[in-house]
Image (cartoon, helix red, strand yellow):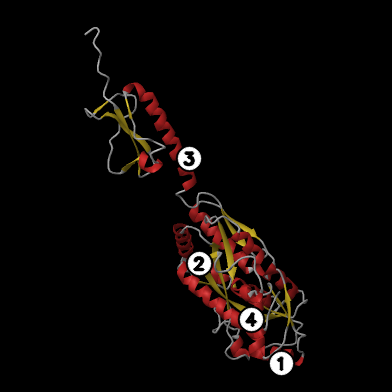
Amino acid sequence: MPGKLQASPPPVQVSACIDTNGLFSVSRLIAPECGRPACNALPVHKHDRDMMPVVAIFGERAVPKKQYSCKNSRRARGLLAGALAGWFSLSAFAEPQYPARAVRLVVPFTAGGLTDILARGVGERLSAAWGQSVVIDNRPGADGIVGAQVAVKSAPDGYTLLMIGISFAANPSTHKTLPYDSVRDFAPLINLVDAPMALAIHPQVKANTVSELVALARAKPGQVSYASGGNGASQHLTAVLFEIMSKTELHHIPYKGAAPAVIDLLGGRVDMMFAPLAASTQYAKAGRLKVLGVTSAKRVSLDPDVPTIAEGGVPGFEARAWFAMAAPANVPKDIMRKINRKIDEQLRDPAFVEKLALIGTVPIGGTSEEFAAFLGSEMKKYAMIVKKAGLQVD
């Protein structure tokens, strides 16, 4: 009737949802009093149990539970658009998929050594499996400390990983101070491989067996030199163990990685080295080195004619290098598990196992927890060796 006030339309409540796949939808604008759609200004979707209200995610202030009339549907759309923008902004930071970009693998030694070769082999496999690049970042120096420091300063997001080995376990004992805490600042990820070494000498050294080398070293205390990939590296600590068990005194010459150490061994600038097995065997066949024994408890299939050092003249001697991965502490556990499982999967692939055998290594794998227990025991083991030998780098 003219002159009579007309009742205002029933209030409208905005109901917006995000489904479990992260897709945004608007269920409807509802007039609570009658339960009918108030207008067709926004699309209508079924609200089911797989959806959760936007208010629950963004909070009362972001999307207030207010009621709007049809006249305010434009404002409702504005609020929903803002919520939608906020959702996409948050999801960009969440990165539910890992890896969503390239992963950096820090190698704390020079290119060309066994650590580097393993890192590139594993990185290539992960890159193919993930569909993302794995970038090898060689940071040699200070017995692996330089590379470890680079890794520990990185964000704990799983996008920076670190290759580690015996030197990582020994550094807390061989160095008075470190720029990081080896236990607190790193998370053990996975043990990659075991690697027996070869006792290799230059052809000019007058010894053809382990016993003859021991006799020569005893006759010339401190004059028989040996190379290593650095203080506290696997080659260094294996030689220290050899000195203790053979009752000899050798002269240590450390390098920034195994690769330059092998080069000087080939050139005759050092007398001997506990070197990578595969490379030593090849050089021995070419007449450029002599391999007197292997550090494992049993002969290896790569060259079964070479005796163990225990057989050759130092009873009970056994030493094995190992190569593994760690991450900065506080990487989310789900990402650590994802990386661990993918690497462990590669280590069980027969084709990859065969390639690892060609470089004289045996895959280990296992869980992060298993590796953490092993790493702890190795730290204790080398702390005793370092103390007994009186080693101290600084």
The mark closer to the camera, 1 or 2, is: 2
The mark closer to the camera, 4 or 1, is: 4
Dots 1, 2 in contact, CB < 8 A: no
Disc 4: which residue:
386
Q: Nearer the viewer, residue 372 or 209?
A: 372
- What secondary structure is found at the residue carrying circle 1? helix
Disc 3: which residue:
89
Task: Give the quarter of the image for residue 142.
Answer: bottom right
Q: Estimate the x, y position of residue 259 in percent, counting from the top left.
A: 69, 69
Q: Residue at x 25, y 13 (%)?
A: 5
> Label 1 to label 2, Cα distance in Å?
41 Å
> Label 2 to label 4, Cα distance in Å?
25 Å
User: What's the residue type where badge 3 is placed?
Assistant: Ser
What's the mark number on residue 215? 1
Q: Estimate the x, y position of residue 360 in percent, counting from the top left.
A: 57, 73
User: What's the residue type where badge 2 is placed?
Assistant: Ile
Image-based side of 220 in relation to 186, left or right: right
Q: Nearer the viewer, residue 193 or 181?
A: 181
- What secondary structure is found at the residue carrying circle 2? strand
> Label 3 to label 4, Cα distance in Å?
53 Å
Q: Residue at x 57, y 62 (%)?
A: 121
Disc 2: which residue:
190
User: What's the residue type where badge 1 is placed?
Assistant: Ala
Q: Residue at x 48, y 69 (%)?
A: 365
